[in-house]
Amino acid sequence: MADHEKLVFMVTHGPDHPEHATIPFVMACAALASDVEVVMGFQADGVCIVRTGEAEQVEAKAFPPLAKLINDFRELGGTMLVCGPCLKGREIAESDLVEGAEVVAAGRFIAEITSATNALVY
Amino acid sequence: MDTTTTQPLESLTAAKVIDARGAACPGPLLEAKKGMGTVAIGEVIEIWSTDPVTKTDIGAWSGKVGHEFLGSLQDAGYDRVFVRRMK
């Protein structure tokens, strides 16, 4: 086992696709519980997941509610990065995002991905 | 009985029992992670789960993070999964 492992999960689906919105958080929480550093990146419609109040409306069959998973993810120490241009294109303000979400641009995503053990795209 | 140890699981007394029955993945795993932090090294936690994949999931997690997966027992409609804290 490597001394330090890190995974990046890129989420590109929004609330209209409950499984694609939920499963990356399931995986991310499991990774954090396994002592793996996790960064989640939200792009395209994925940014809508971290808009305040949105996750409460999302529940994929046979999975925990998305809002619970986001809370678990935060408690476990995960990082949430949100694409700034994607927010702007959807007229979502930074102040509309859930606690802990950080607005970034491409350079930060690339830095996180290239320093990761692996990156997964949902 | 599905067990990876020669010690009978029935004779084990867990330092902490975690009732994760009804929780969907990754709930039992996250509860195991939290519970492990509440017991001393060498002590055992016991996770109850109605999700049939929990026992293999906890087994994989134990190997990944360095705890000892002791095995599982079937009870009435749920599994009892045993893990010893090793670090």
Image: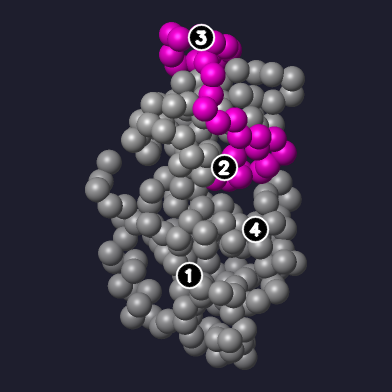
Identify the amino acid type marked 1: Met
Identify the amino acid type marked 3: Pro
Magenta range is B1-30
| Dot label at residue A80 | 1
Residue nearest the viewer, comparing A18 with B75? B75
Mark 1 neighbour class, 10 Å CA radius: few under 14, some 14 to 19, many 20 or more = many
Task: Provide the residue designation for mark 2.
Answer: B31
Q: Secondary structure at mark 4?
A: helix
Instruction: Tell me, yes or no, whether dots 1 and 2 are on the same chain.
Output: no
Mark sitting earlier along the chain (3/2) = 3
Gap in angstroms between the C-alphas marked 4 and 3: 36 Å
- The answer to whether residue A5 of the structure is visible from this angle is yes
Q: Chain of mark 1?
A: A
Task: Provide the residue designation for mark 3.
Answer: B8
Q: Who's the residue at 49% across and 87% down the image?
A: A85
Q: Secondary structure at mark 3?
A: loop
